[in-house]
Image: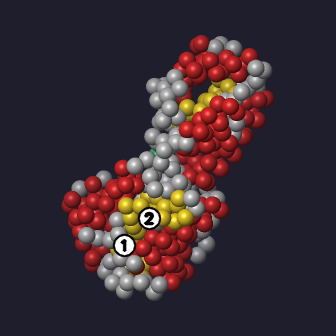
Amino acid sequence: MSTNINKIAVLTSGGDSPGMNAAIRAVVRTCAYHNVNCLGVYRGYQGMIEGDFKEMGPRSVNNIINKGGTILKSARSKDFMTAEGRKKAYNHLKKANVDALVVIGGDGSFTGAEIFNKEFNFPVIGIPGTIDNDIFGTSHTLGYDTALNTVVDVIDKIRDTASSHNRLFFVEVMGRDAGHIALNTGIGAGAEEILIPEEDLGLDRLLESLKRSKESGKSSSIVVVSEGDKTGKNVFELKDYVEEHMPEYDVRVSVLGHMQRGGAPSCFDRVLASRLGVKAVEALLEGKSNFMAGILSDKIVLTPLEQAIKGHFEIDKELIRVSDIMST
Ligand code: F6P
């Protein structure tokens, strides 16, 4: 492996996700394994601009593989969107003798990394960390699997109370503009309907489905709504709409919110984080830059950052069909 790189910095940026700590640990320990120094950057790009750094040896990441959140903290830095901010960040990295950077975050963080790479020819590799699973070049982003399990666990609990009172629940889940969380948890938790941004089913179809469900003898129902869905109504408006058109339904709403981002990472996310961390550091040591490390068909692969940002990991349409059949 190349000896040009003697120090690698690592940061977490954007919305935190379970598995980020496991990825930090993997980056730090892979650096130690290859006798490369590692520097932790606090608060994402904002900490880079302010020179908020900490040297990290292999023992500095003890007992974090099982922890949610990120020990390096995270931020969505507005200053890094300016050329002036990025120049300050570059100067701080140079002063600290950093030769390359690993960015753990989502597409916004990768956009920053790509611009930084272009402006200063600074080697960067991205690790996809977001619960939304909305990044091209990886079938799973870090934290997605954990979030799915968290959501299914909660909907199971909602089902207990829904069925006890013969109620209909609208459960809003996260995902920004992507419906992966809604679609998969909807199937996993046995939802009657799933509303996702990628497929506008329309309000008529929702009412028809709920009518069918009542007629077929179901006494309670769960509808999973992705926060970015395109019905034009938020979950509370959906509740009002259904109650207005189908007064026979007693409707409640549950917005799961940020609890979906917390908690101990699943085993899948811990293993994924470890594999991606190793790949990110070793890719840099091999002289590669401007890639994202991801997983496709259980193989760790590199995708150019530009493609990872521009593309989208598409919804599997077959899952929509499966969900339709399951709600029979
Ligand atoms: O990108 C992760 C995510 O949790 C989205 O699902 C959600 O839309 C957004 O972040 C919430 O952002 P914030 O934590 O800044 O409110």
The kind of residue tagged 2 is: Leu
Q: Where, by quadrant of the figure, is residue 67 drawn?
A: bottom right
Of residues 324 and 222, the one drawn nearer to the viewer in this rendering: 324
Q: Position of residue 223 (x, y in %)?
A: 63, 30
Distance between the Cα atoms at labels 1 and 2?
A: 10 Å
Q: Position of residue 255 (x, y in %)?
A: 57, 36
Q: Position of residue 90 (x, y in %)?
A: 26, 69
Residue at the location (62% across, 48% down)? Answer: 148
Residue at the location (50% across, 32% down)? Answer: 199
Of mark 1 and mark 2, the one earlier in the sequence is 1
Q: Where, by quadrant of the figure, is residue 169 drawn?
A: top right
Verify CB contact (< 8 Å) between mark 1 and mark 2.
yes
Quadrant location, the C terminus: top right
Residue at the location (48% across, 42% down)? Answer: 178
Residue picked out by circle 1? 288
Horizontal relation, residue 76 to residue 196: left or right: left
Q: Secondary structure at mark 2?
A: strand
**Does the image show residue 201?**
yes
Q: Position of residue 131 (x, y in %)?
A: 53, 51
Total numbered circles: 2
Residue picked out by circle 2? 302
**Does the image show residue 57?**
no
